[in-house]
Amino acid sequence: MTKRPRAFSFGGGAGAAILRGVATVVVIGLAWEAVVVGAGIKPYYLPRLSAILGAIAALPDAYLAGFLRTLSETLLGYAAGALVGVLNGVLFHRSRLLRETVFPLFVISQTIPVIAFGAVVVLWFGNTILAKALIAFYLTFFPVTVNTLNGLEAVDKRQVDLLRSFGATRRQLLFRLQLPAALPQIFVALRLACTLSLLGAIAGEWFGDTTGLGVLLLQAMYNEQFVALWAAILMAGLLGTSFYGLVAWAEHKAVFWRSEL
């Protein structure tokens, strides 16, 4: 029997995906430029992409500093929110008392608008990276908590009973069965939290700061600099897309058995 050649597990697939992504971006960019020029759209509504890129190239240090500052705030809040969310999900899965008493408080906390929560946090901690990270954390931990709990609750009880019959401890059950089985659900929340944590960091910068993409957005809006406004939006989109792609890659590596089903 002729053995079927095996495709590259990640290198080839990832390379093709990157090429498709680059090609898509180029096509969208060309279409953007052509539509704006051809339709005579005023910069007030939509500037040319070349003008936006020119604005970024004219002040690279400002946009790079804003990108890195917002990235730092987003990553700190996201990492803390993801960790706390998974821990909360495990605790709520193991303790019915906690699920019935503490979880409703988490639900209530999410009804507080992020603007109101952010104002309080900035008053407490000032215009620091910690304050912005806390706002990103606030938007991140809850969906991760919910999806972790749902994923753990969905684990087949027969598999749990089987491992228990072989003497598996609660720790072994958690790390060898329950968390791996819940990973697809957890990564759904982690991908969603990419956008939420970025929104939290940018919203936090609106309360007063000197660096960050949120600051650049506000400055451009107040000064009615439409090209600069779109430049900040483009940088935020680049950050969010890159972050999402990184988490999606991590999901591909962690939940590897999906491609084998």
Image (tube, rainbow, N blue to C red):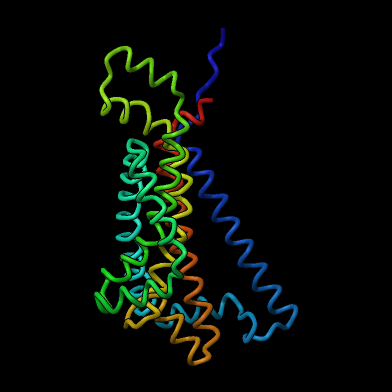
* Residue at 51% over, 39% down: 13
Measured from the top left, where is residue 191 in percent x and y? Answer: 46, 51
Left or right, 259 with respect to 209, comes to: right
Q: Residue furthest right?
A: 39
Q: Quadrant of residue 74?
A: bottom left
Q: Can residue 218 be seen in the rendering of this structure?
A: yes
* Residue at 38% over, 17% down: 161
Count numbered badges in the picture: 0
Check the image and report above or below for 197 versus 258: below
Q: Can residue 11 be seen in the rendering of this structure?
A: no
* Along the line of sight, the residue nearer the viewer: 194 or 236: 194
Measured from the top left, where is residue 140 in percent x and y? Answer: 40, 57
Measured from the top left, where is residue 58 in percent x and y? Answer: 43, 83
Q: Residue furthest bottom?
A: 223
* Residue at 57% over, 50% down: 20
Left or right, 90 with respect to 235, comes to: left
Q: Quadrant of residue 81?
A: bottom left
In the rendered image, the quadrant that contains the C terminus is: top right
* Residue at 64% over, 67% down: 30
Q: Quadrant of residue 1?
A: top right
Left or right, 112 with respect to 48, comes to: left
* Along the line of sight, the residue nearer the viewer: 98 or 141: 98
Measured from the top left, where is residue 187 in percent x and y? Answer: 44, 44
* Along the line of sight, the residue nearer the viewer: 59 or 78: 78
